[in-house]
Amino acid sequence: MLVVNFLPEYCLKELQIKDAVVIVDKGFSSKTNVEALISEELKFIIPLKRNNALIDYTKVEQGNKKDFDGFFKFQERIIWYYTYVVDKEKNLTINLYMDEQLKLEENEDYPNRIETVPEKYNMDGFFRKQHTFGTIAMLDNTMKDAQTVYVNYKSRSQIEEMIDVLKNIIEADSSYMQNEQALETWMFINYITLHWYYKIYQLLVKYELTKKFSPMDFILFLKEIRKVKINTKWYLAEITAKTQKILDKVNIPIT
């Protein structure tokens, strides 16, 4: 999977990747860019702006969850969804998701903005947009189910979480290196760390644990695993039952 903020044909050529799903930034969700991705025969997922004419909010406005295709859980949040085809020949599909928790937050946020920024927000805007609160629509041609598309897209947000991990857990926000060789070594170690971060994320996806844990949660559990030196030998310290249970789920042995 490749997350990009620009059309990726040159990036893919450089990386020599032939089988990829490209996740494009919302700001690039134009007809021209979609056609460019299709012409390059790329699989893609593109979040659409809420005012995009391709989005059909009819079922959301009706408010009857019976009309939705179903729901799934993602990190302890219930995500309702429905899917419809916009271009059968090009395999273009839109998955519309409804996050009730996000909807509640946005229903509270908008009136607060009316009070704090009245020159930009008003009640007319609230009534006009209220049916879109909590929704996200994604255009894709991957032929994957709605939950897989959602999880794939959410992997994009892991970049910000990854930076937070580097700063606050791995404590790699400052190098303190005094020469170029030391700096390159520090950067290489961080590069390896990022690989492990995404390895953990892939394991969580594989064993369907993303609804319960983030990679950061997993790393925090791993930090509690320690070895102690007694006389001249190292021994694995006691692991809590909860940590051991998680390790067993992802099939990671600790030696």
Image (tube, rainbow, N blue to C red):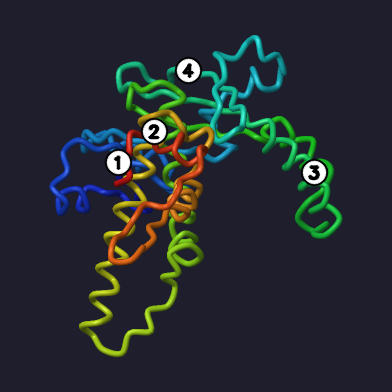
Question: Residue shown at 59%/37% (left/top)?
Answer: 51
Residue 53's image quarter? top right
* Quarter of the figure that contains the N terminus: top left
Label 3 to label 4: alpha-carbon separation: 30 Å
Residue ID for mark 1: 1
Query: Could you tell which of marks 1 and 2 lies nearer the N-terminus?
Result: 1
Which residue, as the protein is rendered here, is positioned at the far top? 66
Q: x and y percent of residue 24 in the render?
A: 38, 44
Q: x and y percent of residue 229 in the render?
A: 35, 63
Query: Could you tell which of marks 1 and 3 lies nearer the N-terminus?
Result: 1
The answer to whether the residues at label 4 and label 1 have Cβ atoms under 8 Å apart is no
Which residue, as the protein is rendered here, is positioned at the far bottom? 178
Q: Amino acid at mark 4?
A: Tyr
Query: Could you tell which of marks 4 and 2 lies nearer the N-terminus?
Result: 4
Q: x and y percent of residue 192 in the render?
A: 27, 59
Residue 248 is labelled as 2
Q: Nearer the viewer, mark 4 or mark 1?
A: 1
Query: Could you tell which of marks 3 and 4 lies nearer the N-terminus?
Result: 4
Label 1 to label 2: alpha-carbon separation: 26 Å
Q: Amino acid at mark 1?
A: Met
Q: Amino acid at mark 2?
A: Asp
Residue ID for mark 4: 84
Packing grade of label 2 (10 A; few <14, some 14-19, many >=20) is few
Residue 108 is labelled as 3
Label 1 to label 3: alpha-carbon separation: 35 Å
Question: Residue shown at 72%/18% (left/top)?
Answer: 63
Packing grade of label 4 (10 A; few <14, some 14-19, many >=20) is some
Say which element carries label 2.
Answer: helix
Q: Nearer the viewer, mark 1 or mark 2?
A: 2
Query: Could you tell which of marks 4 and 1 lies nearer the N-terminus?
Result: 1
